[in-house]
Every structure is written in C-alpha cells, then in structure tokens.
Amino acid sequence: MSVSVLITIVLGLAAIGYVLARRRALAVVDGDSRKLHSRTGYYGQFVFLMTAVPALLVMLVWLFVQPVLIESRIGGMIPESAFPEGGELTLVMSDVRRISNGLDAIEATGQGAAAALDATATDVRAEMAAVGVALGSDVSPEVLSAAQSYRKMQHTGAFWLSIVALATALAFLVGSLSRIRADQRARNISENFVLALLIGASLVAIATTLGIVLSLVFETYHFFQLYPWQDFFFSLTWNPQFRGGSDLGFIPLIWGTLYVSFVALIVAVPVGLMIAIYLAEYAGPKLRSVAKPAIEVLAGIPTIVYGLFALITVGPFLRDWIAQPMGLGDSSSSVLTAGLVMGIMLIPFVSSLSDDIINAVPQSMRDGSYGLGATQSETIKQVVLPAALPGVVGAILLAASRAIGETMIVVMGAGAAAKLSLNPLEAMTTVTVKIVSQLTGDTEFASPETLVAFALGLTLFTFTLALNVLALFIVRKYREQYE
C-alpha cells in the first residue's frame, strides 16, 4: 500500500470518527446539547485529532527510520570485493537502489515478475532490458542479491507500516470515542492542539536557521583544519587550484560583493523612495491603481532575464559609450553593469514596502503639520518620513539582503574575476558567485578548494547579521523619538 493511499485511509477513518463523536456526544445527554461542556463540533474535532495525529506521527517516524535501518543492514551484506575500484559503499548502494527500482518496474509491467525475483543475474538483466531499465555491464551477483534483499525489505516494511498505522488509528478512534462524556473539555483539547500547531509552525523558522548555521559551522571548521584562517581572512588573492597551492583570500570577494550591492542600492533606494512618496502623497487613486502594480511587475521578472539584459544591452552600451571613450576598460562585464541592472530589479522592493509604510503613518500627524502652517512637501520631509523611517530602513535592509545574495545578474553582468579595484567599469565577482563555482562540477568535499564555499557562506551570513543588528539599533533609536 502506497503512503498516499495510507494517508487517505487514515484521514477517512478520522472523518468517520468526527461524525461518530458528534452523534455519541448528543447520545450521552439524550440529545440536549446544552448539557455538554463544549459544542458537538469540538467533540468531533477531538476524535478526529486523536485518530489522525498519532497514526500520522507513526508514519512519519517510520518513513525516517526505515531507510536508515534497511541501508545499514544491506550495507553489511555487501563484501568489499564487490566495490568498484576506488569506489565507496555509497556508490554501491546507489546501484542497489537503482536495480531495486528496476525490479519494481518489471513487476509493474507484469513481465516476468517471478523470474526477476528468483532468476540468475543474466536473466534479471535480460528482463530489465526488456522494459528499458539500464543496469550497466558489470553488475556483480553480490550487488544483485543485495538489490533483491533491499526490495524485499522495502515491501515488508511498507506492509508493516500499513498494519501499524491503521491499527494505531483504529485503537485511538475507539479509545477516544469511549472517553466522550458530558463534562469532557473537548474545546480546550482542540484549542490546545491548535496552539501547539502554531508554536510548532513558529519553531520551523528557528529550527531551519539553526540547521543552516550548524551545517555551515561544521564544514567551516573542517575547512580551517585544512587551510590557515589567517590566509583566508587577510590574503588579497583569490586563486583556487584543485591540484594544490591555492590562494583562497576572502577580501577580493567581499569587496566585489559590497561594491556591486552599493551601486545597486544607489540606484534602487532614491528611485524607489521617490516612487513611494509620489504614490502615497501625490498620486490620485486611478493613477495609483495602475502605477503600483506596474512597478511591482519588475519583482516578478526572473533574474536570468535581468542577467541577459545586462549582458546584451547594458554592458555593451556602457563599454561603447563610457568605458572605451574614457579609457577605463574594454569589457562589457563590469561592476556598474551588474549594479545598474540589479538596482532596477530592487526598485519594487523599496518602493512597494516604503509606500505601505508611508500610508500607515497616522493622518492626524499630517493634519497637525498642516494646522501649524507647513506645506505638503515640508510635512513629508519633516513629519511623514521621520515617522516612517524605521519601516523604510527595513525596506532598504531587505533590498540590501537581496542584492548581497544575488548570483545570476552578477555572473552575466559583472564577470567572475576576483580583484580589488575602485574602477566600476572593471569586471569583478561576488561571494555568491564563487560559492556556486566551487560547488559545481566534479568536486571532492575533502579538499579545501570545495570546503571554502562553506566558509564563504558562513562569513557572508555573519556579515549580513551584523548589518541587521546595526539596522535594528538605528530603528530602535528613531522609534523612541515617537513613542
């Protein structure tokens, strides 16, 4: 029985329990619902939750634990002589899973299922070739036997999962129905479950952040065991060589990241903020209803499209009309190219959020300013913008975080050269681009040239966290002025 079918059956049993619980609650008080502590719907919710939640938790734990146990047991069955030259157990287990899926495909098509389970290795390969399942030319008998055992254990585990999950659902269904009484606090149980669900949902973000940080910390620690941290943080050269003798200096990458982000924010923040002020304070309802959605369309354009725009249009224009005539460069890839295009992409992030924040400023503050004789522009400059400053800082911070994490526009607009230069018309690169380049292709996670990607990620995370703390300090300082 597949997992989806099993979940459907469990939810069906829970739905049946919901109906039976409502009827039983009314039967306990002879049809007078006023004698019940809670509404009949809460009794139904109680039985529904008691039926579905334990069974689904059993399924979740089972689906996590079963693959680990099966692969551990199968791994012990495969002798080292079956490993390919220079191979590892993980590669053999990959073949085992692939062959097991091939056996399932044979059974699904109904062509020689019994022969696939009991025949020799040559017969199994012939059967698999008949249904288009490629095994390769060097499948050993040990691996084939392990694949058959793997498949058998999977089917046995799926069978017992169905039995245990359905038994759990039925047991809790009967037990929860028998607990229904007139004075049972079914509403409290239902509300406590919703509260626990909300707390669990709020903890997802915390757990995800913790998992990301820990994974980066462990791999970064491994990297610094292989490469000196002094060279990483203070070297001015970035030159990875997978054959040894690499220079993995962080400074050229962070310089390119900050330079490109700075150019993008110079474009996005003034333009986006002026758009927000116009839409919130000057534009009429008709113009606002058209202009704001049109500007927000920019946020929905894929970054690869922005990258192509930078590569084909903006880069050649800056090269032919500015860089070459002024003798500042002859490449279409530059910091200015990526920064301008990225700034255009960030405009809706600044304008839309700032517009909502400015509209949230109380009208009474504007009326008080007008009452003191201030003009509309003076009111915006001296009252509205200071009151909305914390939210505007948050919008700028969001745009900055988006700029720091952008990759595709930088690859196609700024190039991949790691260098220290003040010339905005030269090609440079960023941390995110190098993280991608170090983790693509045939990489070996035991080499510092690959593990440096995690050190780059952790350092960039720490840097953006420091920016967030600084922005939070600024926001709180200005908030105190209006509280």
Image (tube, rainbow, N blue to C red):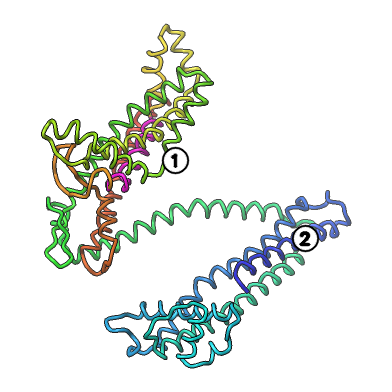
Residue 145 seen: yes
Magenta stretch in the rendered image: 390-411
Is residue 101 in view from this perspective? no
Q: Is residue 474 left or right of residue 300?
A: left
Within-10-Å neighbours for mark 2: few <14, some 14–19, many 20+ = many
* Residue at the image point whose x is 75% and y is 63% from the top: 17
Residue 21 bears which disc, if any? 2
Front residue of 422/474: it is: 422
Please tell me whether the stretch drawn in magenta is mainly helix, strand or loop.
helix
Q: Secondary structure at mark 1?
A: helix
Residue 312 versus residue 359 in the image, above or below: below
Amino acid type, mark 1: Gly
Rendered image: mark on residue 300: 1
Separation of marks 1 and 2 at Cα, in angstroms: 48 Å
Left or right relative to 57: residue 76: left
> Residue placed at 18% from the left, 41% from the top?
331
- Counting residues from the start of the chain, the first of labels 1 and 2 encountered is 2
Residue positioned 20% across, 64% down in the render: 448
In the displayed structure image, the side of residue 379 where residue 87 appears, left or right: left
Which residue type carries mark 2?
Ala
Left or right of residue 148: residue 387: left
Instruction: Inspect the magenta stretch and tell me whether residue 33 lies in it.
Output: no
Q: Percent position (x, y) of residue 148?
A: 50, 86
Up/down of 19 relative to 150, above or below: above
Q: Quadrant of the N terminus?
A: bottom right
Q: Which mark is residue 386?
A: none
